[in-house]
Image: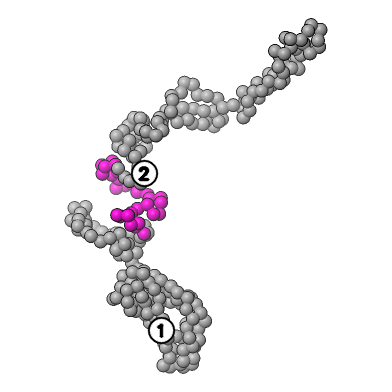
Amino acid sequence: MSDYSKTTDFSTKDALVTGDPNKIVSGTEHDDEYNNIATAVATKTNKKLPATTNNLATLDATGDLGDSGFYFSGAGGTVTATAAELNKTNTTASQGDLDAITNFEETLSATTSEVSILTTKTLNIVDDGALEIAGTAITATAAELNTACDGITATAAELNTACDGITATAAEINRVCDGSLSGSRSYDLPNISSVAGHATFTISVSGATLGDFSLVSANISLQGLNVTSYVSAAGTVTVVVYNHTGSDVNLASTTWNAKVLT
């Protein structure tokens, strides 16, 4: 895309005396100017006339500008498209409903009717940390929530009755939905003697409570050692390693993983 720029200043020729060869306008100079104009015109985007102020522009396959017919007012965020125009995508929201949607920032100000989602539609939250309850992010994955909710046959009225007055926090709900807690640590077991030998150590698992089930694994072969574990205190899993192999076992340092089932 280039702007037109003159090659020859023809007005300066007027001041030259008759007979001055520079006063002559040559065909080459004309060609240069017309070529400059042709290049500028050919590389500029064509305007769409007439057009409406603040309507969104479109580009066709050749790169020419067009008027989309959709209005954008800027800071006000007012939607002026008619319901018929917006119903091209099967929405039945009124203009007022859509005006409310433009107010979305971090706080949802639309009413329940404005954000109602048909049962055949999907609510997709793109930002992983966007869904919160009282400021606490919901960390359960879609798969975990589906596992918890699939097969529920209670009606909306029954669910409302069951859920009204629930005081559980988001963290407590996440714990139920996630189904398990985990922790790990690097640890080098001492040499464990045969038959009666054993070793004990702990792994921190945030959220674990007395009575929870626990499982432990290591990132290397246990060489016949037996491992048991239990929640010995809030947030703590105690691991006990027994040697019943008939010979001493000295494992290399490795990462030990604990899983607590809530």
Q: Magenta stretch?
A: 110-139
> Would you call the spot at circle 2 few (<14 residues within 10 Å), some (14-19), or many (20 or more)?
few
In the image, 207 versus 248, the foreground residue is: 207
Could one spot residue 212 in this view of the protein?
A: no
Residue 82 horizontal side relative to residue 199, left or right: left
Q: Residue at x 28, y 76 (%)?
A: 211
In this view, which residue lies farthest toward the top? 18
Could one spot residue 208 in this view of the protein?
A: yes
Residue 18 horizontal side relative to residue 193, left or right: right
Residue 107 magenta-highlighted: no
In the image, 199 versus 51, the foreground residue is: 199
Q: Label 1 is placed on what type of residue? A: Thr
Residue 32 image offset from top left, x and y in percent: 72, 20
Q: Which residue is drawn at 39% across and 81% down?
A: 239
Q: Residue 200 carries which label?
A: 1
Pointer 2 and pointer 1: residues touching (CB < 8 Å)? no
Residue 233 image offset from top left, x and y in percent: 32, 77
Q: Which mark is residue 92?
A: none
User: Is residue 103 depicted above or below 203 in this figure?
Assistant: above
Q: Label 2 is placed on what type of residue? A: Glu
Which secondary structure, mark 1?
strand
Q: Residue 105 carries which label?
A: 2
User: Is residue 37 depicted above or below 260 in this figure?
Assistant: above
Q: Which residue is drawn at 66% across and 24% down?
A: 39
Residue 66 image offset from top left, x and y in percent: 49, 27
Screen quadrant of the N terminus = top right
- Main secondary-structure element of the magenta-colored stretch: loop
